[in-house]
Image (cartoon, coloured by chain):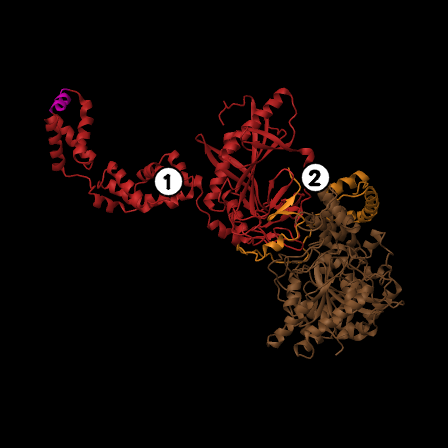
Chain colours: A red, B orange, C brown
Amino acid sequence: MSSNHPFGSYEPVIGIEIHAQLSTKSKMFCASSTEFGAGDNDHICEVCTAMPGALPVVNKKAIEYSIKMGLALGCQIRDRSVFSRKQYFYPDLPKGYQISQFDLPLCEHGKVEYILDGKKMEVSITRAHMEEDAGKSTHHGEYSLINLNRAGTPLLEIVSGPDMHSPQEAAEYARTVHKILRYLDVCDGNLEEGSFRCDCNVSVRKKGETIFNTRVEIKNINSFRFVEKAIEYEILRQIDCMETGEKINQETRLYDPDKNRTFMMRSKEEAHDYRYFPDPDLLTVILEESFVEKVRGELPELPLKRAERFQQEYKIPEYDSFVLTQEKEIADYYEKVVKASGNPKSASNWVMTELMRELNDAKKTFAQSPVSAEQLGAMVMLIDKGTISGKIAKTVFAEMWATGKNPDVIVKEKGLVQITDTSAIEKAIDDVIAANPAETEAYRGGKEKLFGFFVGQVMKVTKGQASPDMVNQLLKKKLAGG
Amino acid sequence: MSKALDIPTVQKVAELARLKLTDDEIKAIAGQLKAVLENFEQIAAVNTKDVEPLVTPTDLRVHFREDAVVVQPDLDAFLANAPARSGRLFKVPPVV
Amino acid sequence: MDLTFATSSEIAAAVKNKKVTALEVTRHFMNRVQTLDKQINAFVTVNEKAEEAAKAVDAKIASGKDPGALAGVPVAVKDLLCTKGLRTTASSKILGNFIPPYSSTVVSRLEAAGAITIGKTSLDEFGMGSSNENAASGIVRNPWNPEYVPGGSSGGSAAALSARMASAAIGTDTGGSIRQPASFCGLFGIKPTYGRVSRFGIIAFASSLDQAGPMAHSTGDCALMLETISGSCSHDSTSASLEVPKWSQLLKDDVKGMRIGLPREYFAEKLDPDVDRVTKEAIEALKARGATTVEISLPLVKHAVPVYYLVATAEASANLARYDGMRFGHRSSNAAHGDLDDLYSRSRGEGFGPEVKRRIMLGTYALSSGYYDAYYAKASQVRRLIRDEFLKAFESCDVILSPVCTSPAFKIGERINDPLEMYLNDIFTTSTNLAGLPGMSVPAGYSSKGLPIGVQLMGRHWDEAKMFNVSLAIENALGAAKARRPHVI
C-alpha cells in the first residue's frame, strides 16, 4: 500500500485462511447430498452422523476440484498426501474429530497475484488442503439444536502467507481467490450460504521491523466488505493496545458487523490439543501423474492472465480488461462478441455499458441474457459497416433486449437503415436551412456554436437515420458555401 | 519418555478425553499406566532413524468414490437412537 | 442327521437338498441357546427374527432359487458388528439400546449366502480384553470348564460355538481376539490379511489392526465362511480389490515340501509345559507329512506388545470419541444443567467400563502434545520394522507356526487386576495384526486339565490358502478338534 496509509508508524501483518466449499453433488466421504436448504437432517447417512462402524470413502470429484484449485494457485501437488484426524468434542462434529490434512497437505507453495490501485501485488499460498465441514448448531437459550445436513461437506482450506499489510489488500486478495474459484467452477462462491468463509490472522508491528508479533484470529467472516472492516478495526485495536502498553493476547475473535467491532471468542489458554494423527480409515492419497496432468489440461485461462491478454490482444484499457474478466462467464461472452464483430474496442463498450446495465437492472447473469453474444457482435458489425448509426444502435439494442430478435431483422422491420445517400441528406439540409433563416444568418455571422442546432434539426428530419459523419461534412459545406 | 505419569497429568488427559473419573479411578489409572508405560519404554531403544511410520500394514490401492448422491430410504432410523430431539434435530445442551 | 455336530457345509447341503428345513435347523440351535446359555452367558441378544429369516431361506429353496452357500447355517455374530434393526451393544453400557440403521458388510454377505444370524454374542467391551470379563452383560464362561475364561475379546462367539449353540461364528481380531478365544475353546479361527474383509459396519476398536473373521469346527467350514465374507467393499477404503480364492474348494491335505518357519524368539518365551508339548506335537505331525521346518529369527517381535498397545489405544481414543451421548447411546442424567462438557464427561465416564477408560486414557496420552513423537510416532516406526522383519522371514519359509498363547485358558478373575500382565499375554498374536498378516488358530491338543490348546499359523499377505492347507493337515493328523467334547454341551 501507499506510504500514507492511516496506521502511522505501524505496519499490519495479515494472513488469511479461506474455507471454500467445493461444489460436489455428494459429501466429502459419503453419498449424502450437499444441496443447500434441505429439510432438517434430510441429507444424512451412517457416515456423516458417525454411526458406530461407519467408514469414510473419498469423493473423487473433491480431489479433482482441489487439485484444480491448487494448480490455479500455482501450488505443487503432492503425489502422496495424507488425511489426518483433528480431534475435539463439539456437538456439530459427530465423530469427535474432523477429517482434515495436517503435515502432508494436497497443495503447497503457491501464489496469487492481483492488481490494487494499479499495482501488481503477490500473496504466497502456504498450503491448500482438503477437509470436511461440521454440522450447524442453532441456539435456543436453554438448549441448542444440531442439523447435520452440512456435516461432511467438502472444503478446501486455502492458507496464505502473512503477506498482506492493509485491510484493502486483504479484501482484494479474498476477492481474487473467490474469482479464481468461480472461474474454475469448483465452488459456487455463495457468501450468504457460507460457501466461502475467511479467517483472518492479524498482527501489528512497527514499520521497518521484520518480527511477527502476537497474532489474533478473526474467524468466519463471510463478506469482503467485512473482511476489510473487521481487519481495520482489529489493527486499530492492536495499535491502541501497543500505544497504551496493553498486552495483546493470542486469541480467537469474532466480528460483529452491526457494531463494527471484534470481540473475544476464546483465548489461547483454552486452545485445543487437537491430537492430529493419520486417519487409519483412509489410505495415503497417491496421485498418478497422469491424473494431475489431465486436470491441468482442463484448467481455464485464469482471470489475471486473461485480463493481461485482453489488454495486449484487444488493445483495451486495463480497467476494462479487469471488468471484463471478473467472471469467466463475462469474459467468455465478451470474446464471443469480439469474434462475431471483429471490433474488440466497440465490443467492450457495448458489453460494459448497455448490456451490463440492463443485466444489472434485470438482476440477470450473462448466461441469462436475452441478447446473445453472437447477436451483439452482429449489431456492432452493422455499426461498423455503416448500416446503422451508433445512436440507432441503441434503439436496436433495446429492441433486441425486449424481443431477442436478431439485429438485422429489427433494422429491416423498423426501417432503421442509416441514410448514406448524399442527395437525400443534402435535401434534408436544404430544407432545414430554408426553414431557419435567422439561425443561418447568425451562424454565417460567426455564431458557430449553432452548428449543433443544425445537426440536431437534420437528424430530426431524418428520424435519426442519417449518417452522422455525412451530416457533419455536408452541413459544414452547405452552411459555409451558402 | 514417560515423565512420571502424575495425578495432574492423568486429570488433564481425562479432561482432554472427556472422561469423568473418580479420585480413586484417577489414582488407580495413574498407577497402572505408569507400570505399563515403564514397560513400553523399551521401544525407545529401537533405532528408527529414517524409518517412515507405518499406518496401513498391507499394500492396498486407494479407491475413490464417484460423486453420486444416494438417498437414504429410512432417514428416521438415523434419528431414532437420539437421547433427545426436537422435531428432526438433535437436542443438546447450549453450545454457546 | 445330528445337527448339533454336523459341519456348516453339511447343514447347508442338507438344507439345500431339502433333507431338513432351515427353520428346523434354526429351531434346533435356538433351543440349545435357551437351555445352555444360562450356564455360559455367551449371547447378549438373541435374534427374534431368526425364524423369519429361516423361513425366507426355505421359501427361496421352494421356489427353486439358489439359497446360497450357507443356506440355513445358524451363525453367532459378535456384538461388535452392526445388524440392521437388531440391537448392537459392543458389550458396552454406552451404546444403551442402540438399534443400527444399517448392517455391516460381513453380516449382509452372510445373510445373502443364506446364513441365519442366530444372535449377538458377548465380547470384552469394544473388543478390549483377552478374557471376556469386561462385558456389560457379565462374564462369559468357557464351556470346557465354566471356572475358566473363554478368552477374548470374541469370547461370546467362541463359547457359543464351542457349546454348539451355533454352527459357525464371527469374531473380530485386533490383537488376537479371534485366535486366542479359538485356542481356549478348541476351535478353528482365522484373522485374515488386513484388507481382506470389509470393516464397514464393524464397530471400530483400532482401524489399522481390526479384521473380522470366522470361527468354526473344521478347516473346511472356516474356509467356506471366510470366502463368503471376503472381498472388495465400496464402503471401506481399506478393503482390497483382489479376487477372493475359493479356499473351500482349493483345500488340500498336502504339506509335502512346505517350509514351516519356527521363530526362535517365540519358543524362547516361558511356555506352559502343555502348550510346549502340544506345539511340538503339531510340528512333528507336519514333518511326518513331508513338511520341513526352518528356524527363523524375528528379533523385534519382543517389542510387539508395546507397539501394539500404543497404536491400538491411540486409534481407539479417536474411534471412541463418537460415543458422546448426542446422537445415540447413553446420556448421563447427572450432569450439571446446561453444562455441555460435564454432560460429555459424565456420559462417557458412566458409559465406558474400566478397561475401555484405561485404554482411552493411554491412547489420548500417546497422541497428546509433547508425547506424540515418543509414543505414537515411534510405535508406528517400529511397526514398520516389525512388518519388514516378517516379510523377510517369509523369504525362507511358507507358513510360520507358533503357540497362540503362553498358556491355556486361565481362571476367571485371575488376571483382571493386572492390566500389564493381561497385555503381555498377547505376545504371540499382536505382531500379526501389526504386520497385517493372516493368522489362524488350529486346535492341536489338550492341557493336563483337559482344556483345549491351539497352535498359531501365520501366512504371507493374501496367502490364506497355504495356512488352510497346513490347518487341514494338523486337523487330520492330530484329530484334536473331534477328540473330546466340552463340559457344557
Location of residue C411 by image quarter: bottom right
Q: From what the image shows, is residue C467 above or below residue A278?
A: below
- First to last magenta residue range: A437-445
Give the structural element (helix, strand or loop) at label 2. loop
Q: Mostly what secondary structure, the magenta segment?
A: helix
Residue C122: where, in percent of width, then height?
76, 60
Q: Chain of mark 2?
A: C
Q: Residue at x 50, y 45 (%)?
A: A187
Q: Is residue B33 left or right of residue C249?
A: right
Q: Which residue is mark 2?
A: C339
Secondary structure beneath disc 1? helix
Distance Cα–Cα, label 1 vs label 2: 51 Å
Quarter that holds the C terminus of chain C: bottom right
How many residues crowd mark 1 within 10 Å: few (<14), some (14–19), many (20+)? few
Residue that numbered label 1 is attached to: A362
1 and 2 marks on the same chain: no
Q: Is residue C477 magenta?
A: no
Q: Amino acid at mark 1?
A: Ala
Picture residue at 59% right of the left edge, 23% below the top: A239
The answer to whether residue A93 shows anywhere in this view is: yes
Q: Is residue A438 magenta?
A: yes
